[in-house]
Amino acid sequence: MYDSHSIPSTGRTAFPPSLAREGLTLEGLCATQPTDKLAAGEVVFWEGDEASHVFYITEGCLRLYRILPDGRRAIMGFVFAGEMLGLSCQRTYRCTAEAVIPVRLRRLSRARLKALGETAEQLQPLLMARISEEMAAAQQHIVVLGQMAAEERVAHFLISAAYRTGTDQKKPVVVELPMTRQDIADYLGLTIETVCRVLSKFKRMGLIVTQGRHTVILRRMIDLRELAGKIDSDETAEINVAVKHLAVWPN
Amino acid sequence: MYDSHSIPSTGRTAFPPSLAREGLTLEGLCATQPTDKLAAGEVVFWEGDEASHVFYITEGCLRLYRILPDGRRAIMGFVFAGEMLGLSCQRTYRCTAEAVIPVRLRRLSRARLKALGETAEQLQPLLMARISEEMAAAQQHIVVLGQMAAEERVAHFLISAAYRTGTDQKKPVVVELPMTRQDIADYLGLTIETVCRVLSKFKRMGLIVTQGRHTVILRRMIDLRELAGKIDSDETAEINVAVKHLAVWPN
DNA sequence: CGGAAAATTGACTTACATCAAACTCAGTGG
DNA sequence: CCACTGAGTTTGATGTAAGTCAATTTTCCG
């Protein structure tokens, strides 16, 4: 993808010369890193671990979660192929990251990332952009959990998944949901039974069709968006477009 | 606070020479900026506004919120004196920021902040640290909204407020809550009645005492923490200590 | 003081949780 | 290939925490 012969070092850290000029992306940086494979259920890192690396997911899906002292599990989010993991933390990771299905990822040490950041000043805005996107997603999640009823939450989840897993916006939209119903419940602050009932209701209403446990076809996105409270017919789209086009920080 | 005669410019942006050496802090940068005053109810910026400035709050308290299409209000957080506002967004602000009580703040243009960032590379880690803290707070909020019952939420809110408004940890802890019960409800994803009932119950249990609408005295923090699910007897403390000591990004 | 906004309390309703029982489906091995 | 298995899911019956509606009561500000 990039030519790899090295250039005279500035003294700190060598990085692919092509990156210095034009196509500097976090994915690009990770592309030269070793690839790891994880089986379903394996953990990339635990909450509280020293935050030593950032990761780029090339394949699969991860759940990010915390376990409360009494055993409840809060799923903070999911990470899909093409997304990054581990950017928005400081000393230690604040969630456990676990493979939902088999995962391939590339790891980049944060020390190296930091060094690169000092060499290539274009890198900082990219990092900022990514973290801001994560923040936007977190705020969205706060609104969903704080203000929306069960049906709205599920509708929102489906729409959001449709955008992220980036089906080509063809109708009807086919969404792959590799996680279990329990995962969805723990993510939406509901019980597994409520998630099931809402999905069944959506089926009865003709809003969705399921194929097996992990495939949902969204018919009538319009109505689903209406149910989701229109919070993000625009906004979710925006967030995801921004991620994909690598928008940069202020100007 | 800082001497203000200008130095030979590097061509971009002048900034106080004292900052270039040692005590570089975001607060320091803001200290040289003009001060604004807002009355209660006045708005610093609206959701969707061009994100042109960051702010340092020297006095008062702000609520950050979004209004959903159907009129529901989601309060995403509060900003107290000594904290910064407007860091974690990109093109536009993602919440409206409104004064709960009279506020004094200093504004720093993001253009200037960016320029400074390119001159003083120590600034980037500070920014990262701040944004990471905001992210940590958002994740905490997600756990509270997604997994905790009403009493746990209120207990958590009280403890959290106690840490942030940085009373000197003397017992009993006196907490000033300038916001209304409705604000608290919209922040915790509850109704105003539920917030009242829980506070009344805590009073009956002898966990708290109130003085007027906006002062709560926490007796028996231990029990309150227990109620809050111990989520953050450590963690909330950590977050707030980190903010105060200006921890920096990875190393 | 007086009045209006905010807070509190009570009576009742409801959305979601809980408990419990089938059902589905993807593997596995006979 | 098909029955067997067990985890995962779905559905139903019932319980309950929190919401809604409706009075008071308190607070505080002119």
Image (cartoon, coloured by chain):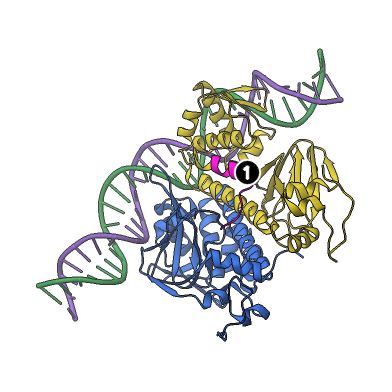
Chain colours: A blue, B yellow, C green, D purple
Question: Residue placed at 56% from the left, 62% from the top?
Answer: A87
| Residue B182 in the figure: left or right of residue A149 | right
The residue beneath circle 1 is B245
Which secondary structure class fits the magenta region best? helix
Please state the horizontal and vertical placement of residue D18, each as a whole percent of the image: 52, 38
Amino acid type assigned to the residue bearing label 1 in the image:
His
The N terminus of chain B, quarter of image: top right
Q: Is residue A66 magenta?
A: no
Residue visible at 44% across and 75% down? Answer: A35
Q: Residue at x 52, y 44 (%)?
A: B144
Please give left or right for residue A173 compared with residue B50 in the image: left
The image quarter containing residue A136 is bottom right
Quarter of the rendering occupied by the C terminus of chain B: bottom right
Q: Position of residue B28 (x, y in %)?
A: 76, 47
Give the left or right position of residue B16, taking residue A53 as reference.
right
Nearest to the observer: residue A192 or residue B164: B164
- As helix, strand or loop, the secondary structure at mark 1 comes to helix
Q: Which residues are magenta?
A: B237-251
Q: Is residue A146 above or below residue B163?
A: below
Say which of D28 and A221 sits in front. D28
Residue drawn 64% across and 47% down?
Answer: B246
The answer to which quarter of the image holds residue A232 is bottom right
Residue A173 position within the rendered picture, expressed as x and y whole percent measured from the top left: 53, 74
For residue A189, say whether it is visible. Answer: yes
Q: Nearer the viewer, residue B213 or A111?
A: A111
| Depth order, front residue of A98/B180 | A98
